[in-house]
Image (cartoon, helix red, strand yellow):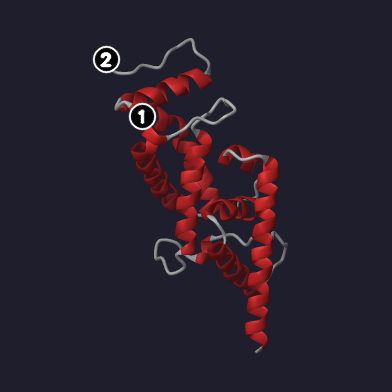
Amino acid sequence: MPWKRPPEEDEYSREMDAIHHAIHGDQAAFRMLVQLYEQRLIAYLTQMLGDHELARDLTQETFVAAYRALPRWQPPETPTASPLAPWLYRIATNRALSLIRQHHTEAMSWDAVRVPFPTPGIGLEDQVVARILLRQALESLSDDDAACLVLHFVAGERYGEIATRLGLTGEAVRKRVARGLVALRAAYLALDTEVRS
């Protein structure tokens, strides 16, 4: 019998029930999960990448990857109203970071990526340099460190928001952003040395 949303359970129980049924091949349960998260992921990726159509494509890729990996999914240690959220956002973020790291991709221009330093009146030349630094820093970081850096400086999210999205603690996010800034500084110094020589 196809899965139907239980009317009386709380959000956590409803979502866990849908996940359980989706793991066992119930398409209706997985569709419910897609409906629950699709618009949120599109909005998130649009903010991160600056391109709505690209965000829609990456959201679809996220759900395909999630469907394949769902049997291996582990619920978060601390139950939340949206237990699948940190995992889905991590998949979406990693896909976006992979795309950002492909600096020659035709699908997205580096012009779409927002400058990681929200300085009013920043000139075009400085924006180009900032994008180069961001790309170089991202290439040297782990996926989690890069995700935190992009979410904080590109998407403008606070540590608590990032922690919720990625299933990390606020302190872990702070440390990852700090590592990202060290990588940005190293990229800047390398670029400065290159320019001076």
103 horizontally vs 189: left or right = left
User: Which of the numbered marks, if any, corresponds to residue 146?
Assistant: none
Relative vertical location of residue 103 with respect to residue 4 in this rendering, above or below: below
Q: CA distance from mark 1 to mark 2?
A: 15 Å
- Which image quarter holds the N terminus? top left
Up the image or down, 39 lies above or below 152; here it is above
Residue 146 at x, y percent in the picture = 57, 56
Q: What residue is shown at x 61% (from left), y 40% (from top)?
A: 168
Closest to the observer: 75 or 63? 75
Identify the amino acid type marked 2: Met
- What's the residue at 39%, 23% (across, down)? 20
Determine which residue is flagged by label 2. Answer: 1
Q: Is residue 179 visible?
A: yes
Label 2: which secondary element = loop
Q: Residue furthest bottom?
A: 197
Query: Which residue in the structure is indicated by mark 1?
Result: 30
- Give the vertical position of 29 relative to 87 (above or below): above
Camera-side residue of 124 and 87:
87
Image quarter for residue 179?
bottom right
